[in-house]
Amino acid sequence: MRRPVTSVSILMATWNGAARLVPQLDSFAAQDLPPAQLIVSDDGSTDATRQVLTDWAARHPAIALRLMDGPKAGAAQNFLSLLRQPVETDLWAISDQDDVWLQEKLRVAAAALAQGRADQPALYCGRSFEVNEDLTGHRLSRGAPWPASFAHALVQNIAGGNTMVLNRAAAEAIRKAALRTTDTVIHDWWVYQVITGIGGRVIFDDTPHLLYRQHGGNVIGANRGALATLMRAHMLVTGRFSDWCRRNIAALRAIEDMLTPENRALLSAFETARALPPLQSLAAIRKAGFYRQGLRGQLSLYAGALLKRL
């Protein structure tokens, strides 16, 4: 018997992205597994973004375009508004407005997600090729040598939003959580925390399937190199990372009943450890098993505990 074709919705947040939007849209149409629909939340663009979208949709009628008005409250809230939409397809794929997907991206993600139980929430994510403004200079993004877990998700994110694909069970869980969440720091980190927190499966693909365009307008940008290391150190010392952790905890408390009992206990342990004196905080972090990727990442976590910056 022939297996049914997997249906996919692409969720994309836009804001003044007209200059880089067409290559990304064209890469959707070129997918081996064509998407059924493209849901766009536009956050009040003043350039030609909306016209680019409607013109492209007219040329590709097989992909239904749903264009919504965003909340005009920043990228995280714009993505949250997308994640509150009804789940109408087998998979949700999250997209930025300025990348380019390789043609196998959705097919590979769908095959990986199909390996597990359909009723278990599952998140596919992975590495990407970091490229220049003109899509040249392919550099492999950071990997994830240590496994995904809630103990990791509380202190670090490995799931780049532009690589994320969720099965229907995960999409339904994220929608339920988004309807109860008013504030997130970064949408992809929050999704990673929710999926691991509820006991979902995370698939990290070491093979890249998209071109992650680096330019001056990136909200986050690539997480590698000397500059990125200095920025992370600055965030730690200034307390910005601590504020992000506080907001993440509040967002998870809003959906606490969705978390597994073990992960509710981990959330409480992290909250307690943050409030302890430096040496006790470090001991609590180590005892609970919180970790970041790689030795430098782990040392930065311990430094955060000692500096009272978690």
Image: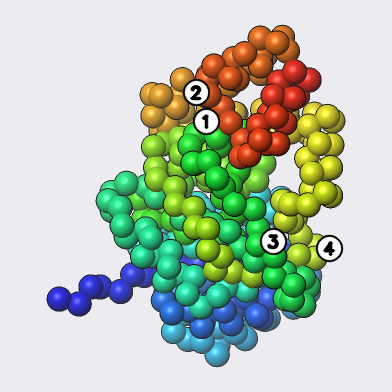
At horizontal 45% and vertical 42% (from top left) the residue drawn is: 195
Q: CA distance from mark 4 to mark 1?
A: 33 Å
Give the labeled residue for mark 3: 43
Q: Residues within 10 Å of mark 1 (few under 14, many from 20)?
A: many
Give residue 222's mark.
none
Q: Nearer the viewer, residue 164 or 17?
A: 164
Residue 30 drawn above or below residue 164? below
Mark positioned earlier in the residue sequence (1 or 3): 3
Give the labeled residue for mark 2: 266
At horizontal 44% and vertical 84% (from top left) the residue drawn is: 62
Q: CA distance from mark 4 to mark 3?
A: 19 Å
Q: CA distance from mark 1 to mark 3?
A: 33 Å
At horizontal 56% and vertical 47% (from top left) the residue drawn is: 144
Mark positioned earlier in the residue sequence (4 or 3): 3
Q: Residues within 10 Å of mark 3 (few under 14, many from 20)?
A: many
Give the labeled residue for mark 4: 216
Residue 204 location, x and y as percent? Answer: 49, 53
**Closer to the camera: disc 1 or disc 3?**
1
Mark positioned earlier in the residue sequence (4 or 1): 1
